[in-house]
Each structure stands twice: as C-alpha cells, then as structure tokens.
Image: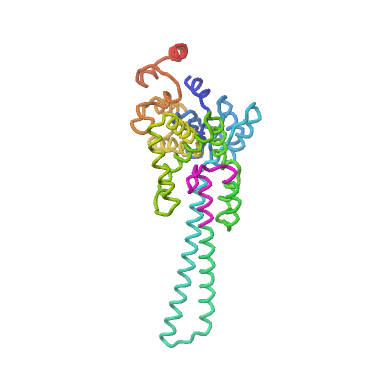
Amino acid sequence: MLDEVTRPKVVEGAFDEIFLRRTPLLMGVEPASLCWVLGRIAENREGQTWASEFDHFPALEHAISDAGVGLLKGLKLSNQGRSQPLEHSLDVFHTIYEGNRAWRRTESQLWKLNARAGELQQDLQRRQRRGESLQGKTQPVRIAQQRAEQALQSAIEIETAWREARECLALFTPEGQLNTSAAARAKLERCLPRLTGALWAKTVRLLRRPESLTFLKRIERKLQELSLSDDLKRDALRFEGLRRWQTLLEGEDPTTRATRGWWLLAQVRYHRDPEFRDAVSSVCGILRSCWRASSLVEGINSVVRMQQARHRRLTPALIDLKRFYWNCRRFRTGQRQKQSPYELLGVTLPQISWWTLLKMSPAELKQELSTQVLKA
C-alpha cells in the first residue's frame, strides 16, 4: 500500500543487490530520506528483472549503482519505455575501492621485489666476508636490483596517476575550484594511460565510462538553472570550496595570503549580506543533492545482513515488515534527526506508532492517506 504512495515520489535512487544464500535480493534506497523503497526477493538479477522494478518508479530521473551487468542492462531496457531517459551514475565508492585495492597489490609487489633484492645482496656480502667464490652470484643480485628500481619508478608513476584520478571524482579540485566534467575527463585522459598493468584494468575501465562523471554534469546543469548573477554564483562557489579545503588558507606565500584575506572578507559578507548567504545556501543545497555514491544502499544492506544472521530464513513478508519498520522509525542523530524516512520523503502518516499503523486495514490506511493528501 505505502509503495504506491512512496515510489512516485522517488526522483533519485541508489540500487544494488545482495544475496540470501544464492537468492538475489534487489535493494533500492532514496538517498535524501534514506527511505527503503525496494526490497524484493527475485529469481534472478538479470536485466529484465531490474527493468521491471525500475518501471515501478515513474518519477525516477537519476539512478546510482555499481557496474553490475544486470543493473546496467535493466537501466537500458527501462529507458526504452520512458519519454525522459534515466541518468545513471556509477558509484564512486566502488571505483575508489577497486583503485585502492589495485594500489595495495602494486605496493605489495614492490616490497616483495625489494625484499628479494635485499636478501640476494646480503647473501653476496656474507660470501665476501667469508672469502667464498662469487662466481655466478653477482649477476642475479644486479638483475634483482634493476627489477626493484624499475618497480619503484613504476610505482611512483602509478601513485601519482591514481592520486590525480581520485581528484577527478571529487566535487572540488585541490585548488578549491568546482570540478567540471570536461576538466575531469581531460585530466583522466592524461593520467589513465599511466595506470598500467593487469591490476589496474578494472579501475581504468570504470573511470573511462562516462557514467563516472554524471554527477558533475548534473551539478553544472543545476547551477546554470540558479537565478543568480555570475559574480554572486562564482563567489558562493569559491566560498564553499575554501570551506572544504581549509589547507588552502595555510602558508605565508603571497597567493595564500591573498586567499586568506578574501576568505576573511567573505566571512564578514556571509554574516552581513543576506543575498550572499542565500546564494551560498543554494549552492550548498545543490552540492548536497547531487549524489555520487550508492553507499547509502550499502548501509541498508548491512541492516539486512544483520537480520539475516538472526533468522534462519528471510521471507518476502518478513522483509516487507522490516522495511516498514525502518521507514517509520525516526532517526535519533544526524541531519535527519527526529524525522522518519517516510516523513523526509513527503509521506504524512498518522501520529501513532508503527505497530498501531501496521494493524490498520488497507482500506483504513488508504482512507487516512487520502485524507492527508486532501489536507495538504
């Protein structure tokens, strides 16, 4: 019943799948409210299955997910029946996770080569001290040292390239400027060729996909729609960039001193100029509402896994019950404090406990919701 009310309100959604043993459980969360809008046990996780679930969200404009084959195919199939195609963002968290894992393996290989070269060098020195013959022993040491040096140079190049690639997935550059899709793509084209080797193949594939930078395009479009002058918008963006990168205010060089002076004046302006304060608030609202990671659905997944450990078997009815409880329960801390996911999504429910609400018949609940809509 409540799915009929909540799903038409979902404009952005984070989607993923987890497994109950070998059975897939399709998951979906509305990011701003953390409303658990999808939790269905399915026979498979193929594209057609996902497409049928996306069709239940008529107002959905933006989907965030990982690079699962079924999910991507489901989005493609769902777009065929929509007048306005869905925008898709690849989850930044998974991309960074894959890159960090590749870097750890690259670093491990480097340490192993260094350790091998060190062992051979120590063995050679021990033979020299004992006066033993070094015939056939110097060449392996020289080769091992050359391999270690080459691995070190390659690791330095890879580390620099990976740091630059991660910067492309951030909202602001290290210089405090708002990242743009064009600049980020150009930077990726320069640094991705330096991420060489089989360990980095998956990370490079993810970063080359245009969906990795969809969130930047959405921010650019929403900023253009703001009814602010270019100067006011630029100052608000610079103010927010410096607020996030406080390290740009440290140092004594002329550029840093000038930046620090601008920041102090902007602080005074923020407290005394309502127009500037409203502009900063509008820019912050856009930045917060452009989701770039599906890690929010991972938080709900952890709740399901905890319940999976407590119960021998999770049935569809039990999952729906837990979903209903989660969406009616008010958050105790954080920016959503004292509000429930249903309330944050815009669903006004009677001021009674979730258990009492659960006992209402579908007809009574439908009448209550209809009354609330008419009052609104």
Q: Residue at x 38, y 32 (%)?
A: 272
Task: Tell me if residue 114 comes above or below residue 17 in the rendering.
Answer: below
User: What color scheme is it?
Assistant: rainbow
Q: Residue at x 61, y 42 (%)?
A: 210
**Quadrant location of the C terminus in the rendered image:** top left
Task: Tell me if residue 357 comes above or below residue 287 in the rendering.
Answer: above
Q: Quadrant of residue 270?
A: top left
Residue situated furthest bottom in the rendering: 131
Residue situated furthest left in the rendering: 332
Q: Position of residue 347 (x, y in %)?
A: 44, 21
Q: Is residue 15 magenta?
A: no
Q: Position of residue 13 (x, y in %)?
A: 51, 32
Task: Tell me if residue 196 comes above or below residue 249 in the rendering.
Answer: below
Write the start and end of the magenta stretch as one range: 160-183
Closest to the observer: 31 or 227? 227
Closest to the observer: 372 or 365? 372
Closest to the observer: 189 or 44? 189
Closest to the observer: 248 or 21? 248
Q: Is residue 177 magenta?
A: yes
Q: Position of residue 268 (x, y in %)?
A: 38, 37
Q: Position of residue 142 (x, y in %)?
A: 52, 76
- How many callouts does the rendering have? 0
